[in-house]
Image (spheres, rainbow, N blue to C red):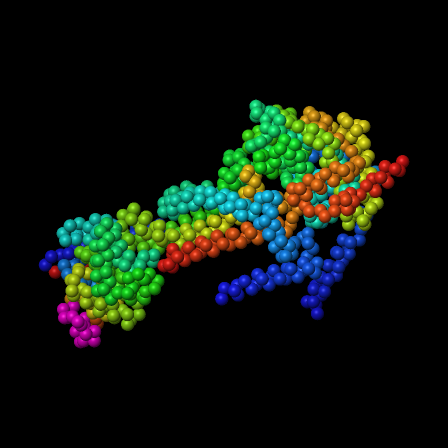
Amino acid sequence: MNRLVPYLCVPFLIFGSISGYAAESTEKPIRMAYLQNDLHHLALWVAMEQGFFKHENIPVEIAGVFKAGPEIMTAFAAGALDMAYVGEAPATTAVANKTTDVVAVAQVNTDGSALVVSSRNSGIDSIADLAGKTVAVPGHSTVQDLLLRKALARHGLDDRQVNIMVLKPPEMIPALRTGQIHAFIAWETFPSKAVTLEIGRILATSKDIWADHPCCVLVSDRKFLESNRDRVAAVVRAHVNATDFIRSNPDEAVQIAVKYTGTDEETVRLALRNVHFTYILSVEGEKEYVEFLSDLKYIRVPDVDIFLKSFMDSDLLEAILKSP
Amino acid sequence: MKWRRLLSPLMLVALWQVLCIWGIIPAYKLPAPTQVLGGLWELMTLGMPPGRLLHLHILHSLERVLYGYAAAVCTAVPLGIAMGWFPRFRTLAEPVVELIRPIPPLAWIPIAILWFGIGIKSAAFIIFLGAFFPILLNTVSGVRSIDPILIEAARTLNAKDKDIFLKVLIPGSVPSIWTGLRIGVGIGWMTLVAAEFTGVREGYGLGYMIMTARDIQRPDEIVAGMLVIGMIGLSIDAGLRLLERRLIRWR
Amino acid sequence: MALSLEIRGLTKRFETQEDHAGLLAFENLNLSVEKGEFVSIVGPSGCGKTTLLRIVAGLERPTGGRILLDGRPLTQREPRVGLVFQEYALFPWRTTLQNIEMGLEIMSVDKSERRASAMEYIRAFGLHGFEHAYPKELSGGMKQRVAIARTLIMNPQVVLMDEPFGSLDSQTRNDLQNFLLGLWRRRRDTVLFVTHNVDEAVYLSDRVVVLSRRPAGILLTCEVPLTRPRDRTSREANEIRKEILQVLAGLKPASTPDVTAR
């Protein structure tokens, strides 16, 4: 009988931990993530530095800093995240392919990427000159991937004439410097960094390609949202305040950006000119993403409108904006 | 009967399918076998990224492995024979080998890119590093484990050093060398996926295909891709074993 | 009678790590073998008889003394001397045919010539049907026949044999002794045969040389004037065997220490 006791404890341990996991403890911090050196996610950093989360009485922990959007979606699938700042395209892909179920509860930014070519005489003066060249993107089904294809399509080009290669953004600058690639498209601060290092010059900003295109969104795991509506609302409120703060206190925002990206101030200031911080969700923009991803056969969405309604939830945001 | 060997993997697959149907294994953690087969079908017909079909990914990966592996064989076998035969050379070379050997091929990726740029050369280099050491070590061991009495017998038959080398050393160490070749190609193939993380310029490769499937959130295709990699590795090994039986009939 | 092999004042000292004086295998050993003579060397284990053979084969260097073959000094690599090992030492990756041909191949003998020669030996040695077999498929007795063929096909002036039948069971051993005798009676090679089996030595040889323990000296040289084929159980054979065994056991004193035959 004594030998069995340890074995009898096992079911209790399992049930105990499961129920402990299920029960929402208000002390458990919300696990969030953002992208490495992605200036678009400045609102999150501001919220942390200026204590906006504390002000809302919600503990937040950074469960991961990732190198590309698809990696954040994988982390959601693994149950490692509750909410995140992430590109709209990877989030859409993940939800459409049913690997994870997240809801976009607020916009994070529009614009804020750029297509960079070598500052030396590369002979590339317009997008049409990219034919026969190699261009790096941060990943398939990222916002930047779609922007590049959109730009190429306007000049009658696609991935048969242009070699689209996947590289993690930190690797793009050395690759451009050594001539391994002819151009790259990435989120700020990478394009501005290439400029201040005098390695690259901007061929086109994402604004040039698609004005005011939605870029990053604040997403929440759907189950988490359903059982923690108040806490998610609090995060959204902090996000709104932080976004407003960026507009009204640009110098302080710069300092925070310098701290979190580890980049110099000159680069950050240059980059900030390219990013538009906003929290209003753009359904039209998202619709275009869905259509683009379907055309590339990355996803299959039977009914676009139903998908949009399910993926985007502005209720919390609207409630916050309405209140004084 | 060969069929009996398939029984336990088939049972495992059946169990896996059942666990998925019952929801014990959630779909996002591990796709069911039926989904994996569907993913495999899409990899072959639609491709990942869409438009790039599986068989082309396979060919490109095989090409990379071939380059890296060939380089490994051409350097490791002669070096191994030299190290096995000349004790002074072995004492010189051994510390260098033992220092570099524990470094995982993946750790070389940043240097590989600096030296060879992004493309087939840096990928082949990583694979070379993976395949080199097993081939080297097995060659050295093969040479050193030749029964000294065979060398003496050859000497009593008037063999000069050149004869000993060609007629005793080399044929005698072939079984060990072959084992090294088999292990080397296995490790080289395994290193392939990691090697393709150095950046795939042409846009084709099994590792690249799996990474893209990850980007586009298709776990069914990820697992299908993994299975393809496993099956090819198995086939290469089986092929080498078959050749071994044909070539080395005297063991 | 012509002296095929002359060993004069042979000394062998092994350098050891601890003891700089070294291990003395034998000192000032003298031994002569006439052309066509079959001489056996017997002695206790570890007395140095194998070392003696290896020096004559050119696998070891003597510390002192001289060895003459047909009056000419022995060089390090000697095509004139053949050695048959106890462990057969067949090349496992070579077939019977290829093993036998090995020496001829090394001497760059033309392919068809060496093949014809090897096939002759295969037939003569009863190995027909096994020419393409690998050593792993052969019995111990067959392997030793291949080893002997490999050595004899080179027509060495002296054939050294180091306990060649030591790994075989007694029946096979007897078979091979008779086989060897049959060969020798036709070819009349000069043979120096090392064994610890006194019965075998008496059965095969013209003369038996008995070595003492290390450092080995010659305790006894015994002629075996019996006509072949010999009866192992004959009175004369028994007497010769008895004398040798007694000397080995130390019961009878050495009759002619360090003797030079004839």
- Quarter occupied by the N terminus of chain A: bottom right
Instruction: Please tell me which residue is depicted at 73% across the width and 30% down the height of the picture.
Output: A211
Instruction: Please tell me which residue is depicted at 32% across the width and 48% down the height of the picture.
Output: B165
The answer to which image quadrant residue C6 occupies is bottom left
In this view, the residue in front, A317 or B178, is A317
Residue B131 appears in the rendering: yes
> What residue occupies the far top of the structure in this picture?
A121
In this view, the residue in front, B93 or C29, is B93
Spot occupied by residue B41 in the image (x, y as percentages of width and height):
60, 52
Spot occupied by residue A20 in the image (x, y as percentages of width and height):
77, 54
B161 shown above or below C26 = above
Instruction: Please tell me which residue is depicted at 24% across the width and 53% down the height of the picture.
Output: C111
> What residue occupies the far front of the structure in this picture?
A156
- Quarter occupied by the C terminus of chain A: top right
Spot occupied by residue B232 in the image (x, y as percentages of width and height):
52, 52
* Residue C228 sits inside the magenta stretch: yes
Looking at the rendering, the stretch of residues picked out in magenta corresponds to C224-240
- From the viewer's perspective, tell me whether residue A79 is left or right of residue C57: right
Spot occupied by residue C26 in the image (x, y as percentages of width and height):
24, 56
Residue A71 appears in the rendering: no
- From the viewer's perspective, tell me whether residue B181 is left or right of residue B212: left
B75 shown above or below A46 = below
The answer to which image quadrant residue A297 occupies is top right
- From the viewer's perspective, tell me whether residue A209 is left or right of residue C158: right
- From the viewer's perspective, tell me whether residue A238 is left or right of residue C13: right
